[in-house]
């Protein structure tokens, strides 16, 4: 399975985290997120320790804080939702800086912000240290259904192709003097979307026939098998195990 596309989240490096097999990092990230979500929201100190653990991983991966913070901007919609919760939630209310806020809403906002930010940060670190092709190999190694892996592989391979086709269609419209300025131009944009769908469908048919003619039988060949040693598994699982210890302590206190 090969897909030599480098995505924008990936940061090339030769750190110990970069060198870990992809399926170990996928398993560690998933386990870490599960532990974070399972932590009681009242244990604020636990979330601070989780952030410290991610900071240690970022330091080991040589991922700058500025790089990580810029990628965290993707969660702005969730932040906006969390900010509204204290205003719209019902129940006991408290005055904060002259504003009447819901206590349950404040706890809910904190829960979303803390757990969401940590989950996104962990995912960004995973993407920053693992190429897309390696992620697909890792998913396959973890026995994810082959059909889902293939769908993800084709999505990655042809996402740029579809984007480039959209760009060419936009340039063609603009070269003919078209400029979308209002609702009266939505018909043209709808026709462009339909044309893009037809072109994408026809390209998919041609690619499928080409693959079948070359012996494709429902599964992509694996060029290089990815394996992990016991030491690599131990190194990768250090993050979720440390987080699990914090979570257990958070429930007992």
Image (spheres, rainbow, N blue to C red):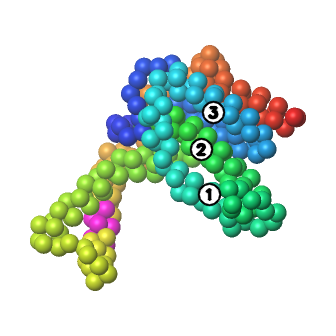
> What residue is shown with label 2?
117
**x and y percentages locating residue 139 in the rendered image:** 54, 39
**x and y percentages locating residue 11 in the rendered image:** 40, 31
The answer to whether one can see residue 171 in this image is yes
> What residue is shown with label 1?
83
Q: In the displayed image of the protein, which residue is found farthest to the bottom?
A: 184
Q: Is residue 242 left or right of residue 184?
A: right
Q: In the displayed image of the protein, which residue is found farthest to the top?
A: 231
Task: Find out whether residue 179 is within the magenta segment.
Answer: no
> Disc 1 vs disc 2: Cβ atoms closer than 8 Å?
no
Disc on the earlier residue, 1 or 2: 1
> Along the line of sight, which residue is nearer the eye, 227 or 30?
30
Q: Is residue 196 left or right of residue 230?
A: left
Tell me what residue is drawn at x 87 percent, y 34 percent: 253
Write down the region rendered in magenta. 194-200
Up/down of 158 relative to 118, above or below: below
> What residue is shown with label 3?
51
Q: Residues within 10 Å of mark 2 (few under 14, many from 20)?
A: many
Q: Is residue 118 left or right of residue 197?
A: right
**x and y percentages locating residue 20 in the rendered image:** 52, 23
Q: Residues within 10 Å of mark 1 (few under 14, many from 20)?
A: some
Disc on the earlier residue, 3 or 1: 3
- From the viewer's perspective, is the residue at label 1 or at label 2 nearer? 1
> Along the line of sight, which residue is nearer the eye, 211 or 241?
241
Tell me the SS state at disc 3.
helix
Q: CA distance from mark 3 to mark 1?
A: 21 Å
Disc on the earlier residue, 3 or 2: 3
Tell me what residue is drawn at x 17 percent, y 69 percent: 173
């Amino acid at each position: 399975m090969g897909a030599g596309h480098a995505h924008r989240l990936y940061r090339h490096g030769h750190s110990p985290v970069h060198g870990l097999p992809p399926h170990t990092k996928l398993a560690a990230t998933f386990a870490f997120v599960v532990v974070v979500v399972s932590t009681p929201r009242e244990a604020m100190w636990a979330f601070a320790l989780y952030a410290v653990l991610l900071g240690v991983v970022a330091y080991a991966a040589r991922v700058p804080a500025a790089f990580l913070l810029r990628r965290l901007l993707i969660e702005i919609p969730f932040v906006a939702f969390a900010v509204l919760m204290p205003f719209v939630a019902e129940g006991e209310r408290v005055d904060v800086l002259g504003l009447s806020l819901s206590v349950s809403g404040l706890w809910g906002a904190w829960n979303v912000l803390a757990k969401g930010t940590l989950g996104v940060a962990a995912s960004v670190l995973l993407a920053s240290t693992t190429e897309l092709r390696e992620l697909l190999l890792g998913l396959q190694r973890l026995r994810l259904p082959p059909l889902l892996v293939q769908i993800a592989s084709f999505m990655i391979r042809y996402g740029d192709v579809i984007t480039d086709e959209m760009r060419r269609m936009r340039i063609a419209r603009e070269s003919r003097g078209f400029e979308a300025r209002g609702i009266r131009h939505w018909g043209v944009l709808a026709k462009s979307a339909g044309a893009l769908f037809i072109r994408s469908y026809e390209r998919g048919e041609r690619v499928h026939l080409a693959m079948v003619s070359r012996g494709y039988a429902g599964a992509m060949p694996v060029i290089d098998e990815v394996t992990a040693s016991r030491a690599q598994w131990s190194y990768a699982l250090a993050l979720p195990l440390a987080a699990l210890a914090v979570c257990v302590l958070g429930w007992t206190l």
